Image (cartoon, rainbow, N blue to C red):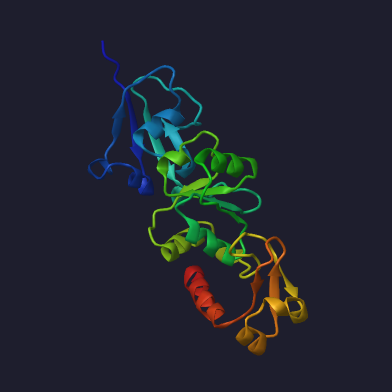
Amino acid sequence: MRSPGVTVRCHGALNDFLPRAQRGQPVTLPWSAHESVKHLVEVAGVPHPEIAALTVNGVPARFNERVAPGAVIDVYPHEDAPAGEPRPTTLRFACDVHLGRLAAYLRMLGFDTLYRNDQSDTELVALASAEERVLLTRDVRLLMRSAVTYGAFVRATTPEAQLREVARRYDLRASAQPFRRCIRCNGLTTPVAKAEVLDQLQPRTRRYYDEFWRCQTCGQIYWRGSHVQRMQALIDRALA
């Protein structure tokens, strides 16, 4: 006799991970005695870091549990969880290779954000796990790796919209410290005397500006030129 299988029901925003025709509908999967709840919900298409809570037949359950044939698994997104989304003690990020501009924007807001455009997925996941960083990605399969504890699928496709999305999800307004990090390398910046960087400045910059900051890691020089007004406007929009 054929097993009745297992049913997965996605709630709220978790339907985004299902094919359009299946959204809002139960997903029926074959049952196996060796498959965990985590495996089943990810076969349905939902990466585990996006799930705030789940139940099996109405009873709260964990990812590593096994289920009986005929079980019904309900999965809920973070916005439906009273306790909010689990996150590291210190909010730090790691961005995949598709999110370079988002990484720069997060650094602009003062958040420690790892990004390398030549980094493999394996290296990225290992670093995010070891350093307890929130992994931000446009790759659903990357979030399904078992080593990922904290992570989010970034739904927006333009950098500014991505920044707004991450700012809302992690309430960045409360802890942002704009312009304290180097956008290029993620190092911290510190004030530096104009005399110390005079030979690195263009003539107009040397003439019109007197306050400067230098990255402690890569040595990049910063000053509050007209570009800072544009950056501040972007920050204001993102944190509004």
Residue 116 or residue 29, whichever sits in front: 116
Q: Residue at x 61, y 87 (%)?
A: 204
| Residue 77, percent from left and from top | 43, 46
| Residue 52, percent from left and from top | 48, 43
* Residue 226 sits above or below residue 192 on the image: below
| Residue 143, percent from left and from top | 47, 41
Residue 79 or residue 231, whichever sits in front: 231
Residue 161 or residue 175, whichever sits in front: 161
* Residue 205 sits above or below residue 117 on the image: below
Q: Is residue 73 left or right of residue 184?
A: left
Residue 68 in sight in this render? yes
Residue 57 in sight in this render? no
Q: Residue at x 56, y 78 (%)?
A: 228
* Residue 8 sits above or below residue 99 on the image: above
Q: Is residue 240 left or right of residue 197?
A: left
| Residue 215, percent from left and from top | 69, 66
